[in-house]
Image (spheres, rainbow, N blue to C red):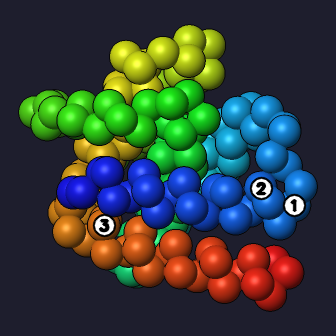
Amino acid sequence: MNYQKLFAMQKGLDQHIESQHQLENEDLFDRKILALLVELGELANETRCFKFWSVKPSSSKETILEEFVDGVHFILSLGLECGFEQKIDFIEKKEVEESINDQFLIVFEKVSQFKKCKCLEKYQELFQAYIHLGELLGFHAEDIEKAYMDKNEVNYQRQKEGY
């Protein structure tokens, strides 16, 4: 995955949104953390991995991928907030096998840890855990990158339409 390209795209979108909404001088870190947690919950809801009481199947792979890249947007944005975009060679594949449910819980925990310590190490752990979640959901780097680029265009269009 070309993280440098994704960071650059996210930086452009963030600047556009902040300019459109007069947020250039605001500290948006906590709001982005909450947005990431909400997106993570929406992703879990689409997978239905925790709904032991229901027989309804998960959403389509395309819907789940779209929800997944919403989280990528906020993780990249948080990295930009902390100045980590130049530290892009950090993703190392860890061979850890958890259930999807377990991995969601790990990602929630990593978000909380990163909120408490806005350091590169905790950011890397969060990003790695999220990418691993994507792998467990069946997504490859190419899938994620293309879906991110598609959703980035949608997000610009939404801004133009007053979303």
Q: Residues within 10 Å of mark 3 (few under 14, many from 20)?
A: some
125 vs 22: above or below? above
Q: Image height check: is 10 above or below 102?
A: below
Mark 1 = which residue? 21
Dots 2, 1 in contact, CB < 8 A: yes
Report which residue position mark 2 lands on. 18
The one of 129 and 119 positioned closer to us in this rendering: 119
Asked whether 132 or 120 is in front, the reply is 120
Residue 65: x %, y % from top left = 40, 70
Between label 3 and label 1, give the one nearer the viewer: 1
Among all residues in the image, which is located at the extreme left?
A: 95
Q: Earlier in the sequence, mark 3 or mark 2?
A: 2
Q: Looking at the picture, does residue 26 appear above or below residue 82?
A: below
Q: CA gap, disc 3 to disc 1?
A: 27 Å
Please tell me whether mark 3 or mark 2 is closer to you in this view: 2
Circle 3 — which element? Answer: helix
The residue under the point 44% across, 56% down is 8
Please, which residue is most extreme toward the top here?
Answer: 117
In the image, is residue 117 above or below residue 94?
A: above
The residue singled out by tag 3 in the image is 145
Amino acid type shown at disc 2: Glu
Q: Amino acid at mark 1?
A: His
Q: Residue at x 64, y 56 (%)?
A: 14
The span from disc 2 to disc 1 (Cα, nearest Å) is 5 Å
Image quarter for residue 93?
top left
**Quarter of the image with the N terminus in it:** bottom left
**Tag 1 secondary structure:** loop
